[in-house]
Image (cartoon, helix red, strand yellow):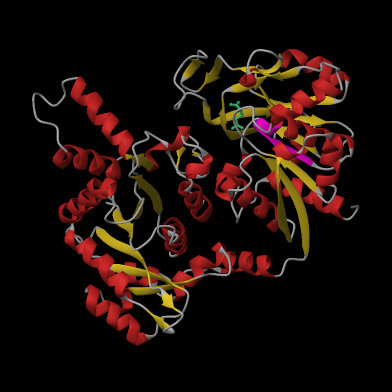
């Protein structure tokens, strides 16, 4: 059988950043899927970090982890949530990775004496990446980070221009996202920024085929024709994108404005109309939920929601599973300085979640939050660092080891959480030293976990063995397992070799689960993650008590 060749949709942005390129791309992919096509999504990031793994969540938002252990841009999370297709390490590349590949090749002598240059070597490596690791997809939607005209993004723009030439119109479509601002004083929408942005794109040799115009007000036909004429696109390919009631309304909104049709027209393809009922259901549920539940998220990046993007989404999916809306109360753990302050601050929470994180800052407050939840029987969910803090909390307050701590804070503690130097992976045994590189060296990606029969975790998942994605450098010390069990704290999930704890829970508590992995990465609006669905359910029950 001959392999069908994928078509590429390149998505660039202009005028300003934060127009929602990733979301528009993901929504378009979701609609194309519902029209029967197989899609894959990719992101090209112009910055020089090899991956976002070492970047602060304040700087770049959450690091999204793929099944195969890639530390990637948070847009890949949108991609997965909208398409249900697992992304891979190979779906996100940065300038840093491209340059690193090239410089390693150069040092190895692979260029045989040639002068290594941006064109053709860097652009060539980008083109290779875009076309690598694909399997019979109909469409590959490839988003270019930043906006057109950014100095660092130029090699990417040049690479996609060349691909447009190499593969031709029948396999490449250029979609450009712009802004049509409304000037309140003049009561007018302005098309000039869009025109300028398209001119800039044209100056790099790219003629957009489809324009998606973000705007706060509808564009009338005259306005669309004007943009079409000045930007040399068909009027039917000028797609207004107004602010939507929720992100889940975006697939329908873009479809109704004709985006997917414009793409199919470009390629000369025909396909049945999409059934978007599943997305509509979620949007309706969001606008008129049966119930509401308040969940406190106690962490240290609480002023910046993007740092917990997948978590926020997974909590709201947990709400969908229960016809409820989750209201997050962001609690800065550094402010929880004593049991009294903590009790006061968390009194109105129907559920308490301590998410992942790094470093020592804010940890004592997280431990206070765990203690409050455990002692007051408030549903508690600890994720990664949150589970580690739960292990420290029970060791301090149930076993009486006052200086129980994590070696991530230094060595002056009784190490209940310690540096993980060895573990089994599919590729074989992994070993790490504490003085090694920080980038890409954690226990990353999907690992299996066996669940304890009769445990809450086993009941929630409805399966004996599960697989979840990880991102951690420290592990909980299994040496305390029996002492904890004697106090009703169980390790209810462990690695298949029994060496690494994966889930802990507290007996006799309405809902207390710590997970060493990040279940939020795998939750999807159309398939809420069981742990989030169950945690929200328990919190709803609690909210009827508070
Ligand atoms: N800092 C902890 C570790 O590296 C937890 C990481 C996390 O929460 N993702 O193990």
Above or below residue 461? Residue 112 is above
- Residue at 38% x, 61% y is 16
Q: Which residues are magenta?
A: 380-386
Residue closest to the eye, 300 or 171: 300
Task: Kindly tell me whether residue 394 is visible in this rendering.
Answer: yes
In this picture, is 8 found above or below 31? above
| Whole-percent x, y for residue 478 in the image | 71, 16
Q: With 71 as the anchor, is 403 left or right in this view?
A: right
Residue at 27 percent of width and 33 percent of height: 99
Residue 202: x and y, percent? 19, 63
Residue 266 place in picture, x, y as percent: 27, 68
Find out whether residue 205 is within the magenta segment.
no
Residue ranking furthest to the front: 185
The picture places residue 13, in percent across and down from the top left corner, at: 34, 59
Q: Nearer the viewer, residue 157 or 78?
A: 157
Foreground of the two, 477 or 465: 477
Can residue 497 be seen here? The reply is no
């Amino acid at each position: 059988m001959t392999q069908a060749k994928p078509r590429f949709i390149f998505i660039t942005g202009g005028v300003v950043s934060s127009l929602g390129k990733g979301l528009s791309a993901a929504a378009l992919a979701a609609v194309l899927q519902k029209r029967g096509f197989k899609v894959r999504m990719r992101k090209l990031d112009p910055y020089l970090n090899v991956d976002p793994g070492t970047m602060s969540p304040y700087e770049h938002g959450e690091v999204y982890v793929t099944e195969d252990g890639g530390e990637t841009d948070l847009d890949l999370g949108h991609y997965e949530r909208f398409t249900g297709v697992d992304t891979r390490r190979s779906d996100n590349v940065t300038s840093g990775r491209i340059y690193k590949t090239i410089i390693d090749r150069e040092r190895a002598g692979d260029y045989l004496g040639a002068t290594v240059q941006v064109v053709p070597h860097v652009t060539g490596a980008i083109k290779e990446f875009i076309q690598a690791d694909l399997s019979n997809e109909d469409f590959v939607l490839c988003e270019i980070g930043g906006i057109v005209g950014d100095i660092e993004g130029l090699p990417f723009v040049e690479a996609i221009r060349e691909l447009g030439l190499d593969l031709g119109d029948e396999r490449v479509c250029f979609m450009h996202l712009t802004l049509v601002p409304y000037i309140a004083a003049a009561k007018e929408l302005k098309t000039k920024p869009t025109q300028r942005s398209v001119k800039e794109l044209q100056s790099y040799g790219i003629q957009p085929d489809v324009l998606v115009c973000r705007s706060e007000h509808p564009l009338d036909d005259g306005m669309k024709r004007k943009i079409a004429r000045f930007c040399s696109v068909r009027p039917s390919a000028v797609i207004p994108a107004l602010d939507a009631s929720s992100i889940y309304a975006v697939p329908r909104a873009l479809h109704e404005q004709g985006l997917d049709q414009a793409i199919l027209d470009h390629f000369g393809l025909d396909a049945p109309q999409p059934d978007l009922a599943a997305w509509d259901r979620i949007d309706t549920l969001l606008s008129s939920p049966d119930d509401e539940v308040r969940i406190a998220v106690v962490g240290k990046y609480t002023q910046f929601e993007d740092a917990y993007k997948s978590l926020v989404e997974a909590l709201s999916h947990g709400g969908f599973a229960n016809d409820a809306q989750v209201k997050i109360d962001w609690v800065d753990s550094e402010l929880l300085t004593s049991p009294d302050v903590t009790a006061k601050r968390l009194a109105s929470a129907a559920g308490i979640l301590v998410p992942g994180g790094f470093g020592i800052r804010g940890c004592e407050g997280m431990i206070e939050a765990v203690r409050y939840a455990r002692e007051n029987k408030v549903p508690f969910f600890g994720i990664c660092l949150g589970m580690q803090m739960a292990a420290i909390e029970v060791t301090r307050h149930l076993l009486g080891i006052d200086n129980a701590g994590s070696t991530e804070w230094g060595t002056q503690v009784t190490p209940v959480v310690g540096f993980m130097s060895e573990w089994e992976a599919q590729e074989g045994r992994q070993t790490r030293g504490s003085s090694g590189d920080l980038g890409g060296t954690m226990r990353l990606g999907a690992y299996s976990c066996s669940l304890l029969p009769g445990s809450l975790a086993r009941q929630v998942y409805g399966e004996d063995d599960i697989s979840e994605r990880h991102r951690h450098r420290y592990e909980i010390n299994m040496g305390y397992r029996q002492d904890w069990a004697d106090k009703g704290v169980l390790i209810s999930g462990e690695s298949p070799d029994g060496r690494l704890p994966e889930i802990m829970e507290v007996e006799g508590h309405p809902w207390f689960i710590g997970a060493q992995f990040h279940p939020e990465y795998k939750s999807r609006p159309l398939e809420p993650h069981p742990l989030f669905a169950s945690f929200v359910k328990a919190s709803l029950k609690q909210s009827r008590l508070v």
